[in-house]
Image: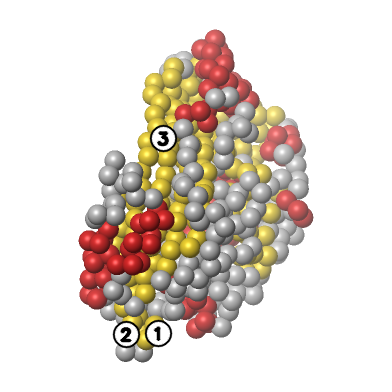
Amino acid sequence: MSTQHSTPQQLVDKALELSRADGAVVLVDAGTDANLRWANNTLTTNGVSAGQSVTVISVKNGAAGAASASAGVVGRSGVDLSTIEDLVRASEKAAEESGPAEDAFELVAGRSSADWDEPPAQTDISVFSSFAPALGETLAAARAEGNLLFGYAEHSMGTQYLGSSAGLRLRHAQPTGSVQLNAKSGDRSRSAWSGVPTADFSDVDVVAAGQDLARRLEWAKRKIDLPAGRYETILPPSSVADLMIYAYWNAALRDALDGRSVFSKSGGGSKLGENVAGSSAIKATLRSDPYAPGLECAPYATAYSSNAYESVFDNGLALAPTEWIKDGELSTLLSTRQTAGAAKVPVAPWVDNLILDATPGGTGPSLAEMTAATGDGLLVTSLWYIREVDPQTLLLTGLTRDGVYKVEGGEVVGVVNNFRFNESPVSMLSRIAEAGQTERTFSREWGDYFNRTAMPALRIPDFNMSSVSPAS
């Protein structure tokens, strides 16, 4: 490929050397991806791919200097040293044609990563060396039980190089992996889903995941029809992640101050400092930490565009552990340096992981223990097709899929029809009746975009199943 003789560091340095703008930021993203796919209990495909893209952000200062600057952002793949000038000029033209940016700020001052000179990290099919034999064992077990397994395993290794005219030279290598399993009975009338996140596949127990899905298919042999209504519901960590990720995406300070979010205060301003957990005895803490064990992510801000919660001018800003909600109180909202400065609050950039602790230290019962302690309720194993209904309350709607189970006397007694649900993750935090241990999990709806989450199972006494869904 045309970029093989151009190292990321060379591309960064050349783009900055060519720049005629008042300031510039260059991002090079190099990545490799390995995957396995299977269907009907048989491996169908595997592959490895590689790619690299370059993004140039040119800054043109206005009459008031950096305070009234404009920015032009252009990104492309297949760029090498012979073609990068065209990208730089296109970025400069975009900056000239843009008006003054609302988020204009001085570029972040320079500092360097100790591993800046290292080449991009790589992955390949060998990452599945122990997983593949275990998967074969799992597929054989499904075949023997008369069930069908479908799924996909993916591992990517992305390395980012961030350089700027202000002297930044930052590098971050990010491993990301996941396994998604879908089991169906031989007649395809019953189904169950499971997702597992991982950094390197050494911690994936696919045999146990297959056994869990087989057990759920057994539960589904008895079908129970229930009407719409509010039910005591146990949400597993993956479903809690589905809802909390959406709340995080809507936690921008600017949106709150503009009266556009669930975190807006009636009459103006934000709800910072207010209790958003209601009178619930369980006060949850929602937080991010770039150094959280098992959930490590880039320790500096990266932005390819400016929006309500990030700014291209903030590229390279150092990140720190941040509590968004602390013991039920809204303590921090996502902000750029510009919005934080205007509101006179500490700046809080986006961090690429999310953790919910609803018990001290994230300890608590397992999902199985919570199920065993249920007298009469529902166990929902996955949510699907989640969409926003009302930004003011963050009311979300979506469907259950691949397993809603009736629990009576601590035992699962059958599978229930699917529902459409209407719930707000923020309201839900004020109604937690019980919380389990916080554990790494994979959001079914958003895991492909937001992989690094740790959540507890939650017992909600009145989860709103708003209508029966005909989806199977």
* Most foreground residue, 425 or 354: 354
Neighbourhood count class around disc 3 (C-alpha, 10 Å): few under 14, some 14–19, many 20 upward: few
Quarter of the figure with the N terminus: top left
State how far apart marks 2 and 1 are (Cα). 8 Å
Residue 67: mark = 1
Q: Which mark is residue 471?
A: 3
Along the horizontal axis of the image, is 353 left or right of 40? right
Residue 337 drawn at (x, y percent): 50, 76
Identify the residue under disc 2. 62
Left or right of 39: which side holds 132?
A: right
Disc 2 and disc 1 in contact, CB within 8 angstroms: yes
Q: Are marks 2 and 3 in contact (CB under 8 Å)?
A: no
Looking at the image, which is closer to me, 144 or 124?
Answer: 124
In the displayed orientation, state which residue is furthest to the bottom: 64
For residue 115, which quarter of the picture?
A: bottom right
Tell me if I can see residue 174 in this picture: yes
C-alpha gap between disc 2 and disc 3:
55 Å
Q: How many marks?
A: 3
> Which amino acid, mark 3?
Ala
Circle nearer the N terminus (2, 3): 2
The residue that appears at 41% across and 76% down in the rendered structure is: 103
**Residue 404 disc label:** none
What type is the residue that disc 2 sits on? Gly
**Is 27 situated left or right of 123 in this image?**
left
Q: What kind of element bears circle 1?
A: strand
Residue that protrudes farthest toward the top in the picture = 144
Q: Amino acid at mark 1?
A: Ala
Figure quadrant of the C terminus:
top left
Label 2 crowd (10 A; few <14 / some 14-19 / many >=20): some
The image position of residue 241, as x and y in percent, is 56, 48
Question: Would you call the spot at circle 1 few (<14 residues within 10 Å), some (14-19), or many (20 or more)?
Answer: some
Residue depicted at x 33% and y 63%: 15
